[in-house]
Image: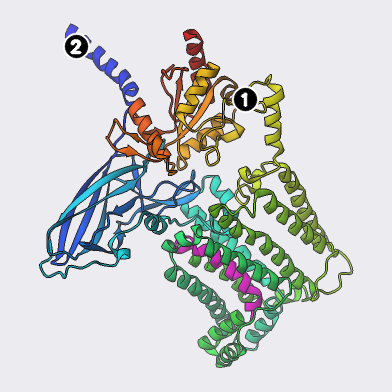
Amino acid sequence: MKNSLKSVILLILLAVSLPLISGAQVFKPVKWTFSTKQISAGEVQLIFSANIDKPWHLYSQDVPPPPDGPVPTSFFFEKSADFKTIGKVKEPKAIEEFDNQFKITLKYFADKAVFTQNIKVLSAKDFKITGYLEFMCCDDTQCLAPETIDFEFNIKGNPEAAVGVPDEKETAVAPEEVVKDTVAVAADTLVKSDSTAKEEVSAANAGGLDKDSSLWMLFFFSFLAGLAAILTPCVFPMIPMTVTFFLKEKDKVKAKAQALIYGVSIILIYTVIGTVVAVTLGANFANFLSTHWLPNVLFFLIFMFFAASFLGMFEITLPSWMINKSDAQADRGGILGSFFMAFTLVLVSFSCTGPIVGAILVASAGGQVLEPIIGMLGFSLAFALPFTLFAFFPRWLNNMPKSGGWLNSVKVVLGFIELALGLKFLSIADQTYHWGILDREIYLAFWIIIFTLMGFYLLGKLKFSHDSDLKFISVPRLAMAIATFTFVAYMIPGMFGAPLQALSGYLPPQATHDFDLNKIVRDNIQVYGSGGGGAEHGSTLCDKPKHGDILHLPHGLEGYFDYEQALACAEQQQKPIFIDFTGHGCVNCREMEARVWSDPRVLKKLREEFVLVALYVDDKTELPESEWITSTYDGKVKKTIGKKYADFQISRFNINAQPYYVLLDAKGELLVPAKAYDLDVDKFLEFLDSGLAEFKKRQ
């Protein structure tokens, strides 16, 4: 009986202690093995097998890199004259899901993933292939710092090989080329990162929509674009003309059948266009579209070209021979005649629908294969609907508004909108390459001016050469003008640093804003409201932070990005240290900052009671040689900020997950048990208070 009771007590103690034990450990959820397969005498397949513990997942090669996404799995081969790679590293079909944190669709692997790389053997002697791979893995609550694994393959020589030096470009893959090739993701819905239309859906995605819901949103917005295309001067007048053609048929059943074929043909033509875009470009092309300056600048120019056309600068037309040939085929009648009549409509209306269709294709080309197809399906369904319905119910034609100058006004309004939305592409290129030509306030200024001019146009105060006289303002037009000027009024405070959360997906980062009143107020509070102190202008810092030009703390907090510098300041000011182990690609870190750090009570304690240091475990910035360290954990030399502090976290605290928060005294000794991801603000405050109490006790 005593032994049974003792066993129960031991089991209870073990159950209680397990969470404490597991709370501080070095996770190794991915185990790699390497092998080879002989394809032929001159060709060998290198096999990289990853066994993944549950519930962890390993990211694909085809994901966007930080700060937009996690670190992609990448493979790097040492240069050698003994072999050359054949193509790129292949991977199995990945799980593809929309991630509500990154706000993009991500590809990842669970349980197991096998990567393969075929190589051509160029040496008659046996040799070794060496290199390393880099990867990152996460579960539902935390992400681990990027990890590198060395690999080595023993390759048998090819007796028939002519020993020579192969093309360097094929022999080895330079890191920057690998990153360029592997930085890819299908952005959610219309174009999150590389298109304007996708930004319209991003707010919905923030509400927790999954991939299927995002596709439905794409369909919905494309459907609205199709309805907008109907209200253009080269489409709207064709509705009664086209319907009259079908009404000439004496057999009403046959007339309705032809009208139905006509509508289906319109849908088919546009959907085929979307399919061609999907097949020729597809998901892998998203990398180039979303990250490189060239396509983004090109898309910006395309939107400006379309806007200029809508504003009446010129007409986008197709060659007349193409339209005449299609029109001749339409005269044949029957199914083929209905199809070519639909094709003629598509060609004739191109000057009005081209900019809209082009915008949808540009937007969805950077996404998944389904997106261009669904986009064109939604557009064409709305576009074909009135022609088919009026052919079925010809009496409805009597209730249609007459053609007139209002149709051109629709085009002009669309032109203003395309002007505004096209700026997003230039903004992406500007942020990616740090040109500094389209900072947040410049971007906002453009939008304020564009929509102000649009409001004046709606009120009849602005007129283009092809506009008819506006004798009076209709109620719908006035309502649109009011909505436009309301939108302008909403944007104006953004020029002074207001966050404008409704537009956060469109605007450049707040950090690019020069005249930010919020920041000025924070700085003044630090100088005058907190009793002064600090080394410079009310700052609580002892000296200028290293890497402060490239790394930042949220919410205007001041701190360091180098542990030794923070430790020296803590000793000087006799304050405890708050270490934030974080990363550019750490989603949960951003969530903690947004939902926990933003609490005024937390901010006050962090700002006034601690010396803050954010240690980025995935930053690629090279350190000067004097700051390189040799790891006591794996014996390797750490040459970057990220590798140095990822090793520091493992070596010192025996854990490699982020976010991870540590409180130390001025001598670098642990005050209280560290804390990981937890969105409970009260518990985080309790963590900070317990650290402060222990620090005062030691004082």
Task: Please provide percent x and percent y for residue 685.
Answer: 53, 21
Q: Residue at x 53, y 24 (%)?
A: 611
Q: Residue at x 45, y 20 (%)?
A: 664
How many C-alpha atoms fall within 10 Å of the one at disc 1: few (<14), some, or many (≥20)? few
Q: Residue at x 54, y 37 (%)?
A: 548
- In the displayed structure, 295 sits above or below 52; it is below
**Range of residues picked out in magenta:** 348-371
Q: Is residue 216 above or below residue 611?
A: below
Viewer-side label of 1, 2: 1
Residue 136 on image: x %, y %: 36, 44
| Residue at disc 2, secondary structure | helix
Q: Main secondary structure of the magenta part?
A: helix
Measured in 3D between alpha carbons, the distance from the residue under mark 1 to the one under mark 2, in whole angstroms, is: 65 Å
Indicate left or right for 59 with 331 as reference: left
Which disc number belongs to residue 4?
2
Q: Which residue bears the numbered disc 1? A: 535
Rendered location of residue 458, percent (x, y): 80, 63
Where residue 400 sits, quadrant-wise, is bottom right
